[in-house]
């Protein structure tokens, strides 16, 4: 198992480096310096500015220093736009927000999705099954930026139950709508995957054996069918994670939660390159870590994978 | 794995059918066509797609306005006067700035369909060739190529795409090339798996034995046999492309004004919904949903037709 | 009272837009400790007959008729009641040992849960008993094998594990569905030996479903031949082997190679089994039958007892003699 984890790490670390270098190069080839928008700056001042941000050094040295600072000091450098802040400050401000509702959305999507999928599979071809399938098909085609305003319309403007935006230090009623808006399409996808894999497992020979052993129905499901049926869901958790990170951009923008996605878009539009770079790398690292965890989880569940 | 198992099922199914009806030989495609036509939902949605495409071609001739023309008589009174109306020629109403939604929805539908199909096409071409080459040549080349795919898979490509659009400026061609290029990974994996099983089939061995060059084998013998799975995958990729484009449009990085796409229209409509102008969301969303449904169902139908496992 | 009394058992399946009946009025009895072989081609309904005894049909399957086990009716029993019979009283072994064990659970856990479920013993007792049973089915080093996952065992080992699992509760009846078909020929012989010795040792009655007459000869007391969902001939193994009275039974026997009779020509049955959804009129076997006459085209022969303990479903009377020179 340890060897397997090391092997996976051996892929993950170069991936992260590729990501850093790739984004760094993209930033460098981008036309227009972050300071070009300002009024004509005297050459000496410009020089000072460049020196302050380390931009006067050769490119390769900038890259190496950048990588070194990230890895050993977890320092993404200063923001190019907000003069009094570092990228770290921005991340520290936005990231906890995103993590909070993202975590709940992830748990919500997994638990509800799996439960719904199992229910639909056990009640195959019943009204409950059709209802679940209808929901999964419907939720697939409604993007979260449509769902979010609809939720606000219903729960904020009509029913007046929940606030339609803001964060308020993550008080529960401010978290509910972002979580639902972010999680719904993944509830649907997980339920769909779970349902079809559970149906397939329930038709397999070893489930017939378990029934022939006189095991009660719920034990057949929990002890014999759940683990194999979960495998496709587990391998889908990586994409869910990526999708939720991407989706958080929409959620942050729409609900003004002040999460990392909002900072990403703002700094992208404001050409705050160091912030974009920092956020991209942070989220990329998270994605890579999440995929690593999923791989390990999968190997742990499936005994047929030899590490 | 899944794919391999599937192809086996196809093979045996063919075998038994040939055995029981020795007189009339039927091709896999002929059979698949018959099965597809029996799938009512899929046929219905194919019909619907054709109607939508026809509508985007014929519809503009009935439009009373152009996409950029602002109707000054309505501007400022949109919630009250801007609704769908046959009388003033705004069949789908107007948008927040008084432009005719009918023609804008038509253009949005065209753009979304084009982005979906072209993006999917880029993914198909790149993914198929990449996967077929990796799978056919195998060995070290294969593991290197697939490792590369693994690495790209774990990069949050959406952010890279956003970066690209910001850095190089918004442009239609970059948009669909970008979308296509980040979406070929799944295709490459599927195709590689299928190629691995194909390359041990007799007809490939026969080609090798008669001295056909490797690249020619890939293009002439492997790729045509991948067609079934590629068609299914490509059909299912189109709605994903359309969703991706709509996401980009929501961020304001998609197609540029005054041009529009369904994603852009929906995102505008969603933001103005609270003023009671539901038609601004309703019409583009209806087209969007129907198109996505249609491609999902057609893709599903194709998969069932080409994979007789569940018959 | 017989151990098992099956009367007019029928099995049907709901298919999209239609219902298909695959077993039609099959009846037989089995005494304690006896072995019955059910023989037939694939698709003859022999497996569905066996599955319906303990209610293991697929979701869209349903059965009617009567299955009395120790005098108790099993058809229509609630699932929770059936669970008390399964494994405890009637155990099953399936055709494909490769897929019949759960690949995600260690062998020992799959065995022990049967005892915990039915005998209410502690986990430790169940594991100890399971390992004893693994030894009893002649697995070398049962303790070691118990800790493995199924995919770490060979096909023969897995089938032995299946047998051990089936015998854990010392059931009165064991139903084995083609238990040797998926195995190597050399392993098959060992497996049959094992069946014989274990059923003798535990006094278990056995229903052996097979298409292999070689299996029947060495193992069974009684035999039932099935064709297209119906029983066509029943009797003792000796009677059917040396004096078959149904043309299909005769066909099966003459199409099987014998080691002793090297010189004899094989007489394969011509044609192929009928489509169960589109059976021929009259006797379902008539298109392939060498003995058919007018009556066979129109009238379905009912199964009837023509000698004490022997019955067949055929319009022909008396012994069958194959006229080889006809062809």
Image (cartoon, coloured by chain):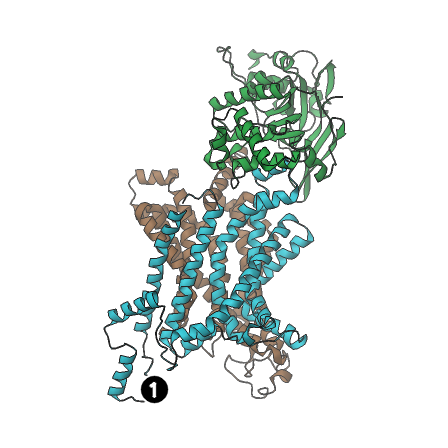
Horizontal and vertical percent position of residue B40: 61, 53
Report the side of A188 relative to C77 (left or right): left
Chain represented in green: C
B89 is higher (above) or lower (below) than B220? below
B76 is higher (above) or lower (below) than A190? below
Horizontal and vertical percent position of residue A38: 34, 86
Q: Is residue B110 visible in this depiction of the protein?
A: no
> Which quadrant would the N terminus of chain C be assigned to in this image?
top right
Nearest the eye: B54 or C36: C36
Nearest the eye: B204 or C215: C215
Horizontal and vertical percent position of residue B13: 52, 39
- Of the chain colours in the picture, the one used for chain B is brown
- Which residue is located at x 74 percent, y 36 percent? C77
**Disc 1 target residue:** A38
- Which residue is located at x 39 percent, y 39 percent? B201
Q: Secondary structure at mark 1?
A: loop
Report the side of B197 relative to C306 (left or right): left
Q: Is residue B184 visible in this depiction of the protein?
A: yes
How busy is the neighbourhood of tag 1: few (under 14 within 10 Å), some, or many (20 plus)? few
Question: What's the chain of the residue with tag 1?
Answer: A
- Of the chain colours in the picture, the one used for chain A is cyan
Nearest the eye: C133 or C218: C133
Horizontal and vertical percent position of residue B231: 47, 53
Nearest the eye: C31 or B56: C31
Identify the image quadrant of residue A70.
bottom left
Q: For the image shown, how many numbered marks are present on the structure?
A: 1
> Which quadrant would the C terminus of chain C be assigned to in this image?
top right
Report the side of A292 relative to A194 (left or right): left
């Amino acid at each position: 198992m340890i060897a397997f984890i090391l092997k996976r790490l051996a892929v993950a670390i170069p991936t992260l480096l590729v990501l850093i270098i790739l984004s760094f190069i993209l930033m460098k080839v981008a036309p227009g310096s972050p300071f070009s928008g300002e009024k004509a700056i005297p050459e000496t001042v410009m020089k000072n500015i460049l020196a302050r941000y380390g931009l006067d050094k050769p490119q390769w040295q900038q890259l190496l220093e950048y990588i070194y600072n990230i890895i050993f000091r977890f320092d993404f450098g200063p923001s190019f736009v907000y003069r009094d802040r570092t990228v770290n400050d921005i991340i520290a401000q936005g990231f906890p927000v995103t993590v909070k509702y993202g975590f709940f959305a992830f748990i919500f999507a997994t638990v509800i999705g799996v439960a719904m999928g199992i229910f639909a599979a056990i009640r195959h071809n019943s009204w409950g099954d059709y209802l679940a399938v209808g929901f999964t098909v419907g939720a697939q085609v409604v993007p979260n930026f449509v769902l979010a305003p609809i939720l606000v319309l219903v729960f904020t403007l009509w029913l007046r139950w929940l606030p339609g935006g803001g964060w308020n230090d993550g008080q529960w009623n401010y978290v509910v709508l972002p979580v639902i808006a972010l999680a719904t399409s993944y509830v649907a996808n997980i339920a769909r995957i779970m349902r079809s894999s559970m149906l397939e497992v329930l038709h397999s020979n070893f489930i017939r054996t378990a029934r022939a052993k006189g095991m009660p129905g719920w034990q057949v499901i929990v002890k014999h069918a759940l683990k194999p049926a979960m495998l496709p869901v587990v391998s889908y958790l990586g994409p869910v994670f990526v999708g939720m990170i991407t989706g958080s951009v929409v959620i942050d923008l729409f609900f003004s939660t002040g999460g990392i996605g909002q900072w990403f878009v703002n700094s992208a539009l404001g050409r705050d390159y160091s912030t974009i770079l920092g956020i991209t790398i942070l989220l990329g690292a998270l994605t890579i870590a999440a995929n690593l965890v999923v791989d390990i989880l999968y190997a742990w569940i499936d005994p047929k994978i030899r590490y | 794995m899944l794919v391999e198992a599937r192809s086996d099922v196809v093979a045996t199914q063919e075998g038994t059918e040939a055995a029981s009806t020795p007189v009339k030989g039927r091709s896999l495609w002929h059979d698949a066509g018959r099965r597809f036509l029996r799938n009512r939902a899929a046929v219905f949605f194919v019909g619907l797609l054709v109607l939508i495409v026809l509508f985007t071609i014929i519809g503009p001739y009935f439009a009373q306005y152009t996409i950029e023309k602002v109707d000054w008589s309505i501007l400022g009174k949109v919630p009250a006067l801007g609704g769908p109306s046959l009388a003033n020629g705004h069949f789908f109403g107007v948008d927040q700035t008084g432009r005719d939604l009918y023609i804008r929805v038509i253009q949005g539908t065209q753009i979304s369909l084009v982005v979906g199909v072209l993006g999917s096409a880029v993914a198909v071409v790149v993914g198929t060739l990449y996967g077929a080459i990796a799978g056919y040549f195998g060995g070290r080349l294969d593991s290197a190529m697939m490792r590369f795919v693994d690495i790209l898979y774990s990069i949050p490509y959406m952010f890279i795409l956003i970066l690209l659009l910001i850095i190089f400026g918004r442009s239609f061609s970059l948009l669909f090339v970008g979308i296509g290029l980040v979406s070929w990974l799944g295709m490459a994996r599927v195709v590689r798996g299928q190629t691995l099983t194909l390359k041990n089939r007799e007809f490939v061995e026969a080609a090798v034995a008669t001295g056909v060059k490797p690249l020619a084998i890939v293009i002439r013998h492997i790729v045509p046999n991948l067609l079934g799975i590629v068609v299914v995958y490509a059909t299912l990729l189109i709605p994903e492309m359309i969703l991706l484009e709509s996401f980009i449009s929501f961020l304001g990085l998609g197609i540029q004004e005054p041009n529009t796409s369904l994603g852009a229209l929906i995102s505008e409509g969603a933001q103005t919904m609270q003023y009671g102008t539901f038609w601004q969301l309703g019409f583009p969303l209806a087209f969007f949903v129907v198109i996505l449904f249609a491609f999902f169902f057609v893709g599903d139908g194709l998969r069932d037709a080409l994979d007789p496992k569940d018959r | 009272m017989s151990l098992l009394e099956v009367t007019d058992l029928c099995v049907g399946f709901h298919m999209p837009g239609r219902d298909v009946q695959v077993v039609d009025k099959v009846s037989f009895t089995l005494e304690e400790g006896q072995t019955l072989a059910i023989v037939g081609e694939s698709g003859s309904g022999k497996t569905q007959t066996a599955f319906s005894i303990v209610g293991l049909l697929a979701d869209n399957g349903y059965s009617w008729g009567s299955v009395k086990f120790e005098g108790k009716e099993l058809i229509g029993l609630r699932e929770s009641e059936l669970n008390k019979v399964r494994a405890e009283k009637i155990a099953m072994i399936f055709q494909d040992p490769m897929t019949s064990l759960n690949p995600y659970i260690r062998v020992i856990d799959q065995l022990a849960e049967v005892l915990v479920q039915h005998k209410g013993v502690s986990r430790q007792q169940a594991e100890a008993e399971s390992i004893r049973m693994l030894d009893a089915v002649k697995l070398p080093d049962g303790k070691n094998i118990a800790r493995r996952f199924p995919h770490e065992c060979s096909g023969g080992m897995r089938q032995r594990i299946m047998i051990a699992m089936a015998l854990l509760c010392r059931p009165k009846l064991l139903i084995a569905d083609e238990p040797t078909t998926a195995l190597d020929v050399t392993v098959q012989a060992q497996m049959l030996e094992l069946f014989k010795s274990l059923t003798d040792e535990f006094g278990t009655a056995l229903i052996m479903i097979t298409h292999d007459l070689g299996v029947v000869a060495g193992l069974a007391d009684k035999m039932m031949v099935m064709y297209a969902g119906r029983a066509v001939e029943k009797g003792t193994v000796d009677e059917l082997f040396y004096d078959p009275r149904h043309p299909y039974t005769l066909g099966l026997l003459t199409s099987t190679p014998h080691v002793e009779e090297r010189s004899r020509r094989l007489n394969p049955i011509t044609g192929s089994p009928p489509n169960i959804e589109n059976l021929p009129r009259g006797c379902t076997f008539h298109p392939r039958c060498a003995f058919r006459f007018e009556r066979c085209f129109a009238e379905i022969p009912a199964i009837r007892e023509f000698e004490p303990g022997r019955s067949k479903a055929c319009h022909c009377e008396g012994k069958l003699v194959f006229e080889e020179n006809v062809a």
